[in-house]
Image: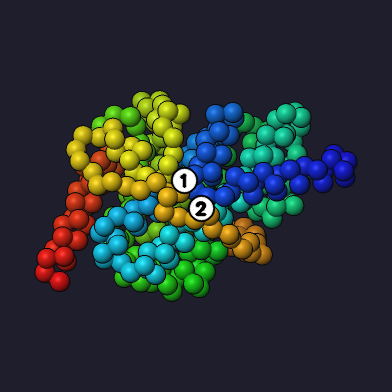
Amino acid sequence: MCKVLEQDSIHYITKATQAHNMDNISRTNAYQKFYLDYPEIKWAFVASLVSRNAGWNMTDLHLAPYKNILGSRERNRLFMTYERANWLIFSDAYPQLLIYKMSSKQSKPLFHLLKFFNVSLFIIREWHYFWKTKNKERLMTALIINEQNIIQNSVIKQSFFEFNVFRKLPYLMQNFINMNAVIIPTRDDRLYGSFVHNFTNVTNRITLGKNIATIIYTPNIYQKTLDFAIKVEHTGSRRDYERFLKGKFPPSPLLRSVYPVIQHQDIVRNDWYRLGGIKKKWQQNKLTLKEIEIKNSFYRKRKMLYAYYHFRNVFM
């Protein structure tokens, strides 16, 4: 590729990534559209569904129990944790997806361009390997490993988030009672997914990501989830999927009605792979699926939260 075309490609990728990295909804939509165009990149569909969950977690912070139990500063810090991680992963992953798209259109690998976007040497090698072997499962696992290492130092271990979020009581309580879950929605009365255990541990998050991917691509679940994704617009409100469930649920706000667009400052990105390498167990795909159908357990925990909220209102 000549220098002029190379610079044009870099400019296009940079602008496209910035445009789609505006907020949680634009990111989710970009992941999903890419997957529908290039279904061999299975990670993109997983990313779109996990990104939907990030939006739902954000708007949860505007529900009555959270507003009653947490102060506005605590809720804003939790929102910024979700938002920063969502933004960082997209800023790293979307250039990779666009370069694969360009490679496919030109029928030749252009992954040398990834170096201009500070992408890890680990994932650059994995893209080259995928181009030769078409091993979809390996690439999906590699992208899960990469995304979770991207946020480990930049969010989880970053001093502001570590001391103001992950060492504070709201996070510790959520972790203790397993309130958080990644929901895989359908347009019927079932929810699939898995609960989030010890979110600050990178190995736990990688295992969770692989677990979620395995559930999504279970044949009978995949078709129902793809149907949901195509037919239900992502708004950031849990109403997106709760309208298909039996029962009554508190109104959940639309994400863009409660949050502005956040201007992020990028950081100097050090290659996590060069700094710490990779653990063999991260690449293993032997999983014992747990908590596949989680509607009852998830909403039982939500009822506990509302019960505590009402108790506080009456007695405290």
- Seen at 81% across and 43% down, the residue is 8
172 relative to 131 in the view: left or right: left
- Residue 149 sits in quarter: bottom right
Query: Which numbered disc flags the more N-terminal residue, 1 or 2?
Result: 1
Q: Are marks 1 and 2 in contact (CB under 8 Å)?
A: yes
On the image, numbered disc 1 is attached to which residue? 51
* Mark 2: secondary structure: helix
Q: Nearer the viewer, residue 169 or 281?
A: 169
- Seen at 34% across and 32% down, the residue is 186
Q: Which mark is residue 254?
A: none
Q: Amino acid at mark 2?
A: Asn
Q: Amino acid at mark 1?
A: Ser
On the image, numbered disc 2 is attached to which residue? 86
Residue 53 appearing in the image: no
Q: Between marks 1 and 2, how big is the CA–CA gap?
A: 7 Å
- Residue 221 sits in quarter: top left
Residue 94 in the image, given as x and y percentages of width and height = 62, 44
Residue 280 in the image, given as x and y percentages of width and height = 52, 51
- Quick one: quadrant of the C terminus? bottom left
